[in-house]
Amino acid sequence: HAHRRPGPLIETFCLIREEPLTREALRFLLDGIGQNLGPGLLRVKGLVNVAEEPGRPAVIQGAQHLLHTMAWLERWPDRDTRTRVVFITQGVTREALREMIELIDRIAARTSRAKARAQSQ
C-alpha cells in the first residue's frame, strides 16, 4: 500500500548561472531568500561566482531564516566556475522559487543600471 505523508512536499532546485553575479545581485538574492522563503527553506548551499572576486568563489549556506555569513574560497575546487546553488524547500514549489529568483534578477539589474546612470552624471 502506498502511504502518503501529510503536509507540503519537499522539492529541490538547482540554480546554475554561467555569468558571474555582481556583489549587489548576490546581496539581493540572499536577502530575497531570507525574507521570502523562511521556514519553507530547509537548506541552501552553493558556490557563487562573484564578478568583483574573479577566481574566488563565495560559499553560501543556510536553513530557514538563518543564512550563515558568506565565506570565500581561495580558488575554485575544479574547472567549473559557474554559480551553483542547491535549494531544498518544503511547501515552496520550484516554479515559485524560479519566479522569485527571476524577480530578484530584474530588481538587481535595474538597481545596477540606475547606479551606473547616477555615477556617469
Image (tube, helix red, strand yellow):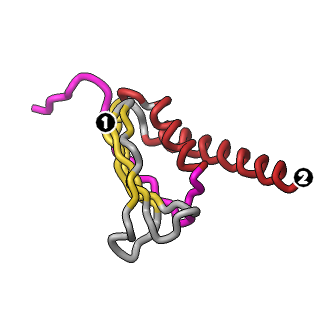
Residue at the spot 45% in from the left edge and 53% down from the top edge: 15
Question: Based on the displayed image, in which of its 4 quarters is residue 6 positioned?
Answer: top left
Q: Residue furthest left?
A: 1
Tally of numbered tags: 2
Which residue does the image show at 52% across and 37% down from the upper left? 31
Q: Position of residue 33 (x, y in %)?
A: 47, 37
Point out residue 4 in the picture as x, y percentages from the top left corner.
20, 28
Whether residue 51 is situated above or below residue 117 in the rendered picture = below
Residue 13: in magenta span: yes
In this view, 5 is above or below 69: above
17 inside magenta stretch: yes
Residue 11 appears anywhere in the view: no
- Precedes in sequence: disc 1 or disc 2: 1
Residue depicted at x 35% and y 46%: 61
Pointer 2: what residue? 121
Q: Residue lying farthest bottom?
A: 79
Vertical placement of residue 65 versus 53, above or below: above
- Where 47 falls versus 7 (above or below)? below
Distance (Cα) linking label 1 and label 2 = 44 Å
| Depth order, front residue of 73/8 | 73
* Element at label 2: loop
Q: Which residue is mark 1?
A: 42
On the question of residue 94 being in view, the answer is yes
Which mark lies nearer to you, 1 or 2? 2
Range shown magenta: 1-23
Crowding around mark 1 (Cα neighbors within 10 Å: few <14, some 14 to 19, many 20+) is some
Amino acid type at image mark 1: Leu
Image position of 17 (left or right of 113):
left
Asked whether, in this view, residue 16 is left or right of residue 19, the answer is left
